[in-house]
Amino acid sequence: MSSTLLFGTHGATRLRCSSLFKCAYRLCCTSKRLRESLLSTSFRSGTVRQPPTPRTSSTSFMPVILHTRPSNWHYVSEGGATIVFSYKGPSHPDFDGTVLRLRKAPVFGGNPDGSTAFNEEEEPDDPTIEFQTKCMQRLIPSKHLPRLESIWLDRSWLEELVRLHDGIRPETRRRKDQVDINRKKGVLATDLVGGNWLAIEIKVGFLN
């Protein structure tokens, strides 16, 4: 598992290199404690994963994708598990400067298969959000971490997104998988293309 830490390079947001090394050192020194914490929540073999901790009143608001149009999002890239779109629509406080990361489902015989269906009450947040919340925020001040939060999705909206953008994707990818239209949650994150950033990737190797 890995996490990318992002720091602005202006004024008070600038961190000295020594501080970065201290943060990395603290991460290594607390790996055992973090491992026990993770295992006790969602990675323990043979147990049912518990739903995410209820949000407090200050964090109860979750953006809704229906506040945008599928045409407002442009295809950026994808990996084996997720696909990323960048917001290029009208100015909106929830979506300006963000990307939408969606989980994918395999395709067999031209039809999507193997997708994961949840209802709104039981679908957990994406593991990347859980890792940042439970691990990285203990070590790095939140102001130095990228925005990473859940967003409510809609099946018909996702179907239109696929219709508009699937032709842009590499053919080899299209034959293998597509956006999982059964998901109720996606990830809204800081758009890191361009801008003045310093990125450090810390790979944590204790989850093998």
Image (tube, rainbow, N blue to C red):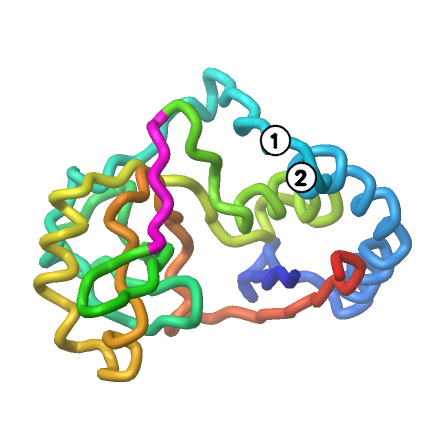
Amino acid on which disc 2 is placed:
Lys
Q: Is residue 124 left or right of residue 194?
A: right
Residue at point 70%, 45% (across, down) = 135
Amino acid on which disc 1 is placed:
Val
Q: Residues within 10 Å of mark 2 (few under 14, many from 20)?
A: few
Q: Residues within 10 Å of mark 1 (few under 14, many from 20)?
A: few
- Looking at the rendered structure, the number of numbered marks drawn on it comes to 2
Question: Residue 181 placed where, x, y %?
Answer: 24, 49
In the rendered image, the quadrant that contains the C terminus is bottom right
Nearer to the camera, 54 or 5: 54
Which of the two marks, 1 or 2, is nearer to us in this view? 1
Residue at point 64%, 69% (across, down) = 200
Question: Residue 128 placed where, x, y %?
Answer: 54, 51
What residue would you read off at disc 2?
A: 134
Determine the residue located farthest toward the top in the rendered image. Answer: 57
Question: Residue 175 placed where, x, y %?
Answer: 25, 76
Vertical placement of 34 versus 23: above or below? above
C-alpha separation, residue under disc 1 versus residue under disc 2: 19 Å
Nearer to the camera, 108 or 28: 108
- Give the overall secondary structure of the magenta segment: loop
Vertical placement of 114 versus 150: above or below? below
* Image marks 1 and 2: residues in contact by CB distance under 8 Å: no
What residue would you read off at disc 1?
A: 48
- Magenta span of residues: 114-120
In the rendered image, the quadrant that contains the N terminus is bottom right
Q: Is residue 61 left or right of residue 181?
A: right
Residue at point 86%, 61% (across, down) = 25
Residue at point 56%, 24% (across, down) = 53
Whether residue 169 can be seen here: yes
Describe the element under mark 1 as helix, strand or loop. Answer: loop
